[in-house]
């Protein structure tokens, strides 16, 4: 099959500007040149995904290939947004990885019951975040095979998903504790 040159679109939903910056820097540290978008709460996340308000133009709010979702945000928290996404037939197939400071068993169980794909506790050090981002992106964009007719912009070449031509493969989340 032909290789795609489309960048990976990653949507990061986190209300902390410092965490947004660190996640962006961790992606850059892994030499990933992706189409990054940021929202600051669950309401803004849903507006982005449903093309409402300032996100009405699809070219400024493309469908994400991956959502990194914080749980504790104002207006609408990550749990509520996750529930709405997984209930929406047009959105439910977007992979969602929780990236949060919460270690609460209740949050882990609840989010998996709602359909989250992975739950990762934010690491304490930047290097640990770089390692996590490497593993998560490698997993979602290089290792995983999605079902036929999966609504995505990726094409397969042999056994690998082919990322943007400038992107380096990256990776999966873990709790370092």
Image (tube, grey):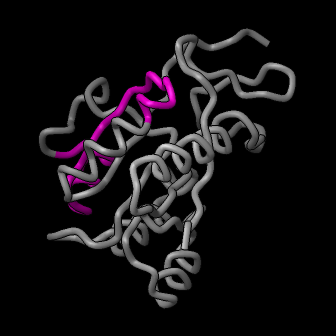
Give the image location of residue 90, x and y in percent. 49, 50
Instruction: Determine whether, in the image, residue 171 is placed left or right of residue 111.
Output: right
Residue 89 belongs to magenta span: no
Residue under the image location 55 percent in, 68 percent down: 175
Q: Nearer the viewer, residue 75 or 128?
A: 128
Tell me the quarter of the picture where residue 157 sits.
Answer: top right
Q: Position of residue 162 (x, y in %)?
A: 68, 21
What segment is highlighted magenta in the picture? Answer: 27-52
Extreme residue toward the bottom, this view:
106
Tell me the quarter of the picture where residue 147 sits.
top right
Give residue 124's quadrant in the image: bottom left
Judge whether residue 38 is colored magenta: yes
The quadrant the C terminus occupies is bottom right
Across and down, in percent, residue 169 comes to: 63, 28
Between 35 and 48, the one nearer to me in the picture: 35
Q: Is residue 17 left or right of residue 77?
A: left
The answer to whether 97 is drawn above or below residue 34 in the figure is: below
Residue extending farthest to the right is 158
């Amino acid at each position: 099959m032909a290789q795609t040159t489309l960048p990976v679109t990653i949507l990061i939903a986190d209300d902390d500007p410092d965490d947004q910056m660190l996640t962006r820097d961790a992606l850059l540290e892994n030499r990933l040149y992706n189409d990054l978008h940021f929202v600051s709460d669950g309401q803004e996340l849903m507006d982005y995904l449903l093309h409402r308000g300032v996100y009405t133009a699809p070219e400024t709010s493309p469908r994400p290939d991956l959502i990194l979702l914080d749980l504790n945000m104002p207006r609408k928290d990550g749990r509520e947004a996750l529930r709405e996404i997984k209930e929406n037939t047009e959105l439910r197939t977007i992979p969602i990885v929780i990236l949060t400071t919460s270690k609460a068993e209740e949050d882990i169980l609840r989010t998996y019951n709602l359909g989250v794909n992975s739950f990762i506790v934010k690491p304490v050090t930047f290097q640990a975040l770089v390692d996590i981002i490497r593993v998560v992106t490698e997993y979602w964009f290089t290792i995983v095979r999605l079902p036929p007719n999966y609504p995505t912009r990726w094409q397969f070449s042999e056994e690998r998903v082919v990322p943007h031509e400038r992107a380096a493969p990256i990776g999966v989340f873990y709790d370092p504790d």
